[in-house]
C-alpha cells in the first residue's frame, strides 16, 4: 500500500477521483487513511466496492450514524439532525418529514422551478456566457427552498452563505461553520415560533401544526428539520446542477440526442446522477469488529462509505466511465444513498436538475466549458464547484 495514496480532502484528487477509486476497488477495497492532525478519530477507513457500499448502508446496526456522518467531526458541536441518528429516533423524525414532503407537494413546485430556471437563462442568454455555479446552480435550489418553506426570497443570499460556511469546506466545525449553525438555529426557531398555531400550507407550518399525538416536537427540534432541509436541499443539488451543465457541455452528442428524443430525459437524469455522484461519500462508525476482504475494521472506527466509487464499479455497471443516457438499470445507483438514510428529498432534487438542464438546452442549445477556468473546491462530502465558466453563441432578443 506504500505506493498508493488517496486523500479525499486533498485538492489534488478533486477533479478526477475515479482512477483512484478503481485502484481501491481492485487492490485496496478496505483502505485505511491516517489523519495527521485529527480532531476525533486518528484514522478512518474507506470502502469502495458497490456490494460493500450497499451492505454497509443496509446494516445500520453495524454501520451506525449516531457518531456522525462527516469524517473526523465532533457532532456534539453540530445541531442534532436525522443524518446523525439511528432508529428509533431517526425513524420517528423521518416519518414526520415523509408525511409532509408528499408527491403532490413536490409536484406543485414544478411551475415555480421551471419559471425560475427560464428566468435565469433568459438573463444571461444575450451575454453569451455565464458561470454554471454562481449564475445558475447556486440559485435554483435556494429559490426552491424559499417556495417550499414560504421564506422571503431576499434571504436567499444568507441561506447560500450559511450553506457554504457549514458544508462547503473541509472543516465542518470551523469557526465560520459554528457561527453559521448558531445563526441558523436562531433564524429557524423564530420562523417555527411564528408559524406555530397558524393555518399555513407551507412545509414548516405543516410540520409544526399537524403533529400526531405523542410527537410533541419542540421549536428547536423542528428548527433542526429546517436546518437539515436547508443544508441537504442546497448543497448537493446546486453542485449536481452545475456538474450536469459541465457534463452535457462535454457531450454534445448527448445534447443532440435529448433534443431529438425528449422521452430520454428521465433516464438521462439518472445517468447524470450515477456518473457525477454529487455525494461522493458519507461516514459511519462500526458498532462491532467487521471482517471485510481479509481486513478487520475494529469496533468504534469511522468508515467513509464511497458512493461515488460504487457508482463507477465495473461489477455493477459495464463500462462505468462512459456517460451513456441509454444505459440500462441506471436508476439502481447510490447517488442518494441507500437504506434507512436514503435521501427523502430525492424527488425534489430530480425535479430541480431536470428543469434546470431542460431550460438551458431549450434556450441555449450548444455551449462550451472553459475547462481551464473550472475550479473544484470539495470532493467529500459533495463534488463542490467554486467556478464553472461556460460560453455559447449569444442569442439576441
Image (spheres, rainbow, N blue to C red):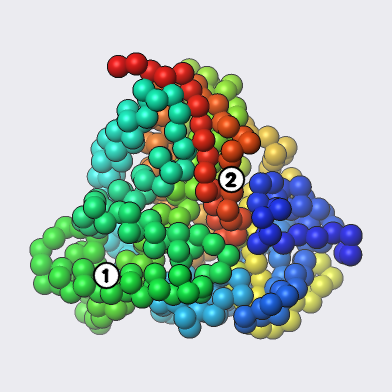
Kindly identify which residue carries mark 2.
375
- What's the residue at 15%, 70% (across, down)? 194
Residue 283 rendering spot, x and y as whole percentages: 60, 69
- What's the residue at 29%, 63% (across, down)? 99
Q: Are marks 1 and 2 in contact (CB under 8 Å)?
A: no
Q: Nearer the viewer, residue 134 or 52?
A: 134
Residue 374 rendering spot, x and y as whole percentages: 58, 40
Residue 116 rendering spot, x and y as whole percentages: 29, 38
Is label 2 in a helix, a strand or a loop? strand
**Mark 1, other Cα within 10 Å: few <14 / some 14–19 / many ≥20:** some
Q: In the rendered structure, which disc, 1 or 2, sits on the residue that comes first in sequence?
A: 1
**Mark 2, other Cα within 10 Å: few <14 / some 14–19 / many ≥20:** some
Q: Work out which quarter of the rendered image holds the N terminus and state it.
A: bottom right
Q: In the rendered view, tell whether residue 391 sits above or below residue 152.
A: above
Q: How many marks?
A: 2
Q: Work out which quarter of the rendered image holds the C terminus and state it.
A: top left
Q: In the rendered view, tell whether residue 243 sits above or below residue 310.
A: above
Taking the image as shown, residue 177 lies to the left or right of residue 143, namely: right
Kindly identify which residue carries mark 1.
187
The quarter of the displayed image where residue 319 is located = top right
Q: Nearer the viewer, residue 339 or 9?
A: 9
Taking the image as shown, residue 252 lies to the left or right of residue 18, namely: left
Q: Nearer the viewer, mark 1 or mark 2?
A: 2
Note whether residue 354 is visible: yes
- What's the residue at 66%, 83% (across, down)? 300
Q: In the rendered view, tell whether residue 66 sits above or below residue 366.
A: below
The quarter of the displayed image where residue 218 is located = bottom left
Q: Identify the mark at residue 132; answer none if there is no mark.
A: none
Residue 243 rendering spot, x and y as whole percentages: 53, 41
Q: CA distance from mark 1 to mark 2?
A: 32 Å
Amino acid at each position: 500500500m506504500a505506493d498508493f495514496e488517496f486523500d479525499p480532502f486533498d485538492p489534488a484528487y478533486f477533479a478526477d477521483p475515479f482512477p483512484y477509486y478503481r485502484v481501491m476497488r481492485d487492490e485496496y477495497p478496505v483502505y485505511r487513511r491516517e489523519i495527521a492532525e485529527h480532531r476525533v478519530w486518528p484514522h478512518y477507513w474507506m470502502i469502495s466496492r458497490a456490494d460493500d457500499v450497499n451492505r454497509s448502508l443496509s446494516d445500520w446496526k453495524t454501520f451506525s450514524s449516531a457518531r456522525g456522518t462527516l469524517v473526523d467531526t465532533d457532532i456534539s458541536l453540530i445541531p442534532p439532525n436525522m443524518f446523525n441518528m439511528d432508529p428509533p429516533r431517526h425513524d420517528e423524525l423521518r416519518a414526520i418529514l415523509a408525511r409532509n414532503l408528499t408527491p403532490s407537494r413536490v409536484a406543485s413546485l414544478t411551475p415555480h422551478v421551471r419559471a425560475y430556471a427560464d428566468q435565469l437563462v433568459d438573463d444571461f442568454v444575450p451575454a453569451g456566457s455565464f458561470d454554471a455555479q454562481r449564475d445558475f446552480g447556486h440559485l435554483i435550489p435556494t429559490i426552491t427552498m424559499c417556495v417550499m418553506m414560504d421564506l422571503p426570497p431576499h434571504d436567499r443570499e444568507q441561506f447560500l452563505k450559511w450553506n457554504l460556511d457549514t458544508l462547503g469546506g473541509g472543516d465542518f466545525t470551523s469557526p465560520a461553520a459554528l457561527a453559521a449553525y448558531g445563526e441558523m438555529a436562531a433564524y429557524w426557531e423564530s420562523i417555527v415560533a411564528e408559524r406555530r398555531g397558524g393555518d399555513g400550507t407551507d412545509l414548516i407550518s405543516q410540520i409544526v401544526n399537524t403533529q400526531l399525538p405523542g410527537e410533541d416536537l419542540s421549536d428547536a427540534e423542528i428548527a433542526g428539520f429546517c436546518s437539515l432541509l436547508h443544508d441537504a436541499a442546497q448543497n448537493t443539488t446546486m453542485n449536481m446542477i452545475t456538474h450536469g451543465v459541465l457534463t452535457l457541455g462535454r457531450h454534445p452528442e448527448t445534447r443532440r440526442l435529448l433534443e431529438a428524443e425528449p422521452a430520454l430525459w428521465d433516464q438521462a437524469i439518472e445517468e447524470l446522477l450515477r456518473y457525477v455522484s454529487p455525494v461522493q461519500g458519507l461516514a459511519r462508525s462500526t458498532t462491532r469488529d467487521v471482517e471485510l476482504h481479509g481486513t478487520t475494521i475494529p469496533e468504534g472506527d469511522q468508515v467513509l462509505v464511497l458512493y461515488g466509487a460504487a457508482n463507477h464499479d465495473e461489477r455493477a455497471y459495464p463500462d462505468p466511465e462512459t456517460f451513456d443516457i441509454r444505459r440500462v438499470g441506471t436508476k439502481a445507483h447510490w447517488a442518494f444513498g441507500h437504506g434507512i438514510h436514503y435521501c427523502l428529498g430525492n424527488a425534489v432534487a430530480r425535479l430541480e436538475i431536470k428543469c434546470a438542464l431542460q431550460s438551458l438546452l431549450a434556450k441555449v442549445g450548444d455551449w462550451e466549458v472553459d475547462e481551464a477556468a473550472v475550479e473544484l473546491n470539495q470532493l467529500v462530502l459533495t463534488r463542490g464547484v467554486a467556478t464553472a465558466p461556460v460560453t455559447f453563441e449569444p442569442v439576441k432578443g
